[in-house]
Image (cartoon, grey):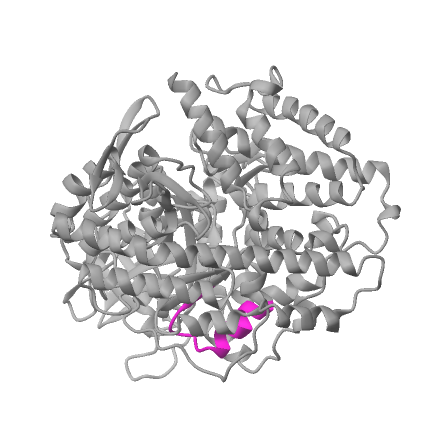
Amino acid sequence: MAKRIHIAGLQVDVQLADFVNKELLPVADLDEVKFWNDFSAIISRFTSRNDFLLSRRLEMQDSIDQWHRDHQNQPHDAEAYERHLFDIGYLLEEGDDFSIGTENADLEITAQPGPQLVVPVKNARFALNAANARWGSLYDALYGSDAISEQDGGERGGGYNPVRGERGIAFARQFLDQSCPLARAPHADGSDASGSHRKLSHVEAQSYRIVDGCLVVDVMGEPARLASEEQLRGYRGEAEAPSSVLLLNNGLHIEILIDATSEIGATDAAGVMDVVMEAAITTIQDCEDSVAAVDAEDKVEVYGNWLGLMRGDLQETFAKDGGTLTRKLNSDREYKAIDGSGFSLPGRSLLLVRNVGHLMRNSAILDGEGNEIYEGIMDAVLTSAIAYIDILKKAQDGLRNSRTGSVYIVKPKMHGPEEVHFTCELFFAIESMLGMNGNTIKLGIMDEERRTTLNLKECIRAARDRVVFINTGFLDRTGDEIHTSMEAGPVVSKAEMKNAPWIKAYEDNNVNVGLACGLGGKAQIGKGMWAMPDLMGRMLEEKIAHPQSGANTAWGPSPTAAVLHAMHYHQVDVFEKQRSLKDRSAASRWDLMTLPLMSDSSSLSEHDIQQELDNNAQGILGYVVRWIDHGVGCSKVPDIHNIGLMEDRATLRISSQHIANWLHHGICSQDQVVETLERMAAVVDDQNKHDPLYNSMSGDFENSYAFQAACDLVFQGISQANGYTEPILHARRIAFKARELS
C-alpha cells in the first residue's frame, strides 16, 4: 500500500506530496497551505462535472449502437442517421462566424511555421533532445539518414565517408540555392553587373562576407548578393570574415557556419563546415499517449522532468561511444545585427505540455471519500503550477520558455464543445488559484475524436480566447471512428481506411474550419506524425503535403526528422497557402459522416483476413510488451516487415478496435484471433531476442501481463469507453509492478 498523508481533505501519496512541497512550491513562490486548499477545492468543484461528461459519452454511444442495431440489414439512411445524431446532442447546430481572440501567444505559434516534435517527458534524455532540436545540422541529418543515396560508394557506417559527405554538402548547397538564391551584385553606380550570364550558385561559393550591410558571396571570382537582400539577418565574427551568416526565409532561420580549419570546412572552397537549420520550432512535452505513468512514482518522474525544463536545470548523463555525456538545455544563440548591435534567438523549442484526457483516474491523490481523483485535473493543476516558474522568470541562467508569459497545454481526446468548455473553466480556476491573468493558460485542441471533428467550429468557439492549436491525428481518430460505428457493420481494412472519404474530408475540414475561425497568424493548425524514422527519404518526398495543405506545423519522430522536414517550410510559404485556401469550400459533412464499412465482406479471402489479423496483432504485441514490462510509452517498434515505426497508444487503439470489429461481425473467430496473437507473440519475441531485459511472452501466455493486456484490448474492445486503451494498460502495468516488487 502506498504511504499517504492527509492534506486539505485529500490523501496524497507521500512521493507526490514531497515533490510538490519541497521541489515545486518553494521555486514557484506558492504558499503550501493555500495551494493544497485551492487544489482540493478544484477537485471538489470539477469531479462531478467530469463524471457527467463521461456519462454523456456513454449515453450517446449506447444510443448510436442501438440505432445501428435497429437498422441492421437495411441500406444506410444517412439523413435519418444525421437526424438521430442531432436528436441526442452528438451533433450541434453551428453558430455564427467568429474569429478567435487569443492574445499573447509566442511568435513560434503565430508567425513561424515549422516542424513540431512530440516527446515523452518521462524520459529526460528524450525531453532534452527535443527541447534542443530548435536548431540542427543539415549536414548531419543528411549524412546519417537515407535522405541521400548509399549507392556507388555512399554507404553509411564506420568512419567518415567522403563520398557520402560530398553528396550531403551538394544537397545542402542546392537547398540554399532554392531558399536563399543568389543574384549578381550591381556596379557601384547601380547598373547590372556585366560578365557571364551563368547561374550563380552557393555550390560554387568561394567566400562569404558582409559588406555595407549586404551579404557578398564570391562565386568563382564573380561577386554575388542575395536575390532578396532582406534575407540577411545577422552574423557572427567579423564582417569581412564571418564565422557564421544568418539568413531568414518564410519565417525560419538558416545559419551557414564557416571555419576553414575544421575537418569539413578545410575541404570547402568557402570554408563552410555546416548548414544549420532552425527546425523544431515547438515541442510537445507529453504526459499522455507516449508515456506509461500509472501511479505516484511515475507521475513524480513526469512532473519532475517538466519542472527541470521550466527551471532550466534538467540534465541527463548517459554512456555513449565508450564515454559519458551530459545533456542539458541549450542557451540562446547570440548574433550581430547588420548595424553591429547584438541580438539573440531562442536556443530551444517553445515547449507545450500535453496533459492526459478526461477519462482516467490516478491513485497518486485520493479525494475526501477515498476515490482516486481524475488525472486530467491533477495534470492541469501541477503542470500549470510548474510552468508558473517560467512566467515568474525564475529559470536558471535566465532561460525562458514563453517570452510572452503564456502557458501552453495540449488537451487530447475531448469529445465535443461541452468538454472543451469544461477544460477552459478548469483552466480559469487554475489561473485564479495561481494568481495568473485570465487566458494565460493557452489550449491546444486535439481533433482526434469523431464528435470533435463534426463540431470543430463550436469546439474552437468554446476556447476562442485561449486556443493556440488544433491538429489531426489519424490513428486515434480512426480508432474512434471504428468504435462509434461498431454496430454498423464490418469496417474496411486499415490500408483501405486511409483512402476512405471521411479521412480526406477530416484532414481538409480541420484546415478549413481553423482558417474560417481566424487561426491563421494567431494559432497553429497541425498535421500528424511521420511514423517511420528510418525512412527519411520517403518523408522528404511525401511530408511536404502537410504545409501544402495549409498546416503551419506537423509532427516529426526525431530531431533529425525535424531538420529535414524544416526544408518543406522553406519550399512552401504556408501563410500564403492559407490565404489561398481561405475561400475554399468547406469539407462535406456527408463525407465526414460516411461510414467506413465494407460493401461485401464475403469478398475477403481467408488470406486477406489472416494478413490483416497478423498485421494488427503484431502491432499490438510489439508495442504493449514494452508498455507493460518496461513502462515505455513511446519507442521505435519493428512492424511485421521489420520496419521500425514510432508507436504510442494510438497504435493499440486502431489495431485492437479493428480486430474487435471483425470479430464482432463474424469475419474471424475468437479461436482464430487467439491463435494469431500467440503466433505473433513468438514473432515479437524473436524481434526482441537481443534485448537482455526482454521478457518473452510465448513461453508462458497465462503469466505474461503484456500478452494478457493485448488479449484484453481485443476481447474487451467493444466494452471499453470510446475504444480507449488506458484502463486496461494501467491495470496490467500496476499488476506487473506489484509482482516485480513482491
Residue at 43% x, 37% y: name it. 292
Identify the residue at the far right of this view: 602
Quadrant location of the N terminus in the rendered image: top left
Q: Quadrant of the C terminus?
A: top left
Q: Residue at x 27, y 26 (%)?
A: 324
Q: Is residue 26 above or below residue 427?
A: above
User: Seen in the image, is 563 located left or right of residue 704?
Assistant: left
Can residue 277 be seen here?
Answer: no
Against 240, is 657 above or below? above
The foreground one among 215 and 380 is 380
Judging depth in this view, the residue of 324 and 4 nearest the camera is 4
Q: Position of residue 274 (x, y in %)?
A: 35, 48
- First to last magenta residue range: 508-525
Q: Is residue 23 left or right of residue 632?
A: left
Using the rendered view, name the quadrant where residue 741 is placed.
top left
Residue 720 on image: x %, y %: 58, 44
| Residue 103: in magenta span | no
Task: Tell which of 348 and 436 is nearer to you.
Answer: 436
| Labels in figure, total | 0
Q: Nearer the viewer, residue 59 or 726?
A: 59
Q: Is residue 517 magenta?
A: yes
Q: Point out the residue furthest to the front here.
A: 369
Q: Position of residue 344 (x, y in %)?
A: 20, 60
- Give the quarter of the image for residue 19: top left
Residue 254 x, y percent position in the rendering: 35, 59
Could you tell me if residue 226 is visible in this image? yes
